[in-house]
Amino acid sequence: MKLQPIDIFIIGLYLVAMIVIGLILKKRASKNMDSYFLGGKTLPFYMLGLSNASGQFDISGTMWMVTLAFIYGIKSAWVPWLWPVFNQIFLMVYLSVWLRRSNVLTGAEWIQTRFGKNKGANLSHTIVVIYALIGVLGFLSYGFIGVGKFMEIFFPWDYVSQFVPFDIPAEYVPHAYGIFFTAIATVYVMLGGMLTYGPTWCSSPL
């Protein structure tokens, strides 16, 4: 695949726009923890829905779904019903009111709200924090590998290496792409928080 100048321009414009949006919303997100994690609790329902929906799509998941379709055929459409449908609809519809009224930011805080701060609750709180950290690292790795392998197809290293002052062994090219795009996404999210990203089912913020 050979990208035309207009293709490269669009991709570059998208990456720059991500950083610009993060910078613009940084001031609002840095007011307090509620503003960063929960958008100041001022986002309308349709923006919350769009934010959450957009957070469910990633290149690794798309590649995985295509693989399932290739292996299982049309019946692979039932696979997402194993978790996201019930999680997004049932869990959030019935728990959203409780979570909002509890005034907590994370699943770990919810444990303390529900069970207090005794020894058992503190141990449960610790487990939730550990689970969240492992989950975040796992999904970062999952997306990291996916975006690296995907971008290698669209940006062959033979072409890109002409503009880079160093060489990378072929087996590490996906890693280099993964680091580059993950770094941009990290800056984007760190600057704007909920206002630019939004929650996903695996994040620790509620």
Image (cartoon, rainbow, N blue to C red):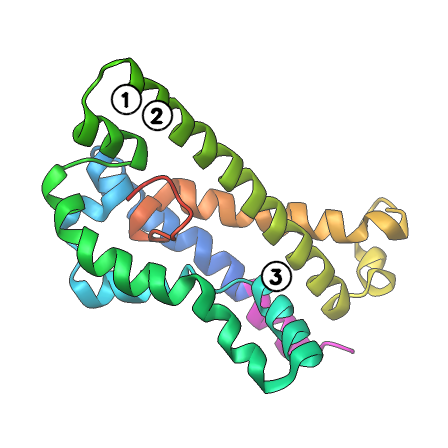
- Answer whether residue 56 is magenta in the image: no
Farthest residue in the front direction? 120
- Residue at numbered disc 1: 121
- Residue at numbered disc 3: 60
Q: Is residue 167 left or right of residue 16?
A: right
Is the magenta region chiefly helix, strand or loop?
A: helix
What amino acid type is highlighted by mark number 3?
Answer: Ser
For residue 129, say whether it is visible: yes
Q: Which mark is residue 157?
A: none
Residue sitting at x 23%, y 34%:
110
Q: Position of residue 85 (x, y in %)?
A: 37, 67
Farthest residue in the left direction? 101
**Of labels 1 and 3, the one closer to you:** 1
Badge 2 element: helix
For residue 27, say whether it is visible: no
Q: Position of residue 58 (x, y in %)?
A: 53, 62
Q: Which mark is residue 124?
A: 2
- Answer whether residue 6 is magenta in the image: yes
Q: Position of residue 28 (x, y in %)?
A: 23, 43
Residue density around tag 2, few if under 14, some if 14–19, many if 20 or more, within 10 Å? some
Q: Earlier in the sequence, mark 1 or mark 3?
A: 3
| Nearest the eye: 132 or 178 | 132
Q: Calculate the distance from the C-alpha at mark 1 to the C-alpha at mark 3.
A: 35 Å
**Magenta segment boundaries in residue numbering:** 1-12
Q: Position of residue 134 (x, y in %)?
A: 53, 35
Residue density around tag 3, few if under 14, some if 14–19, many if 20 or more, within 10 Å? some
Q: Calculate the distance from the C-alpha at mark 2 to the C-alpha at mark 1.
A: 5 Å
Badge count? 3
Vertical side of 53 occupied by 7: above or below: below
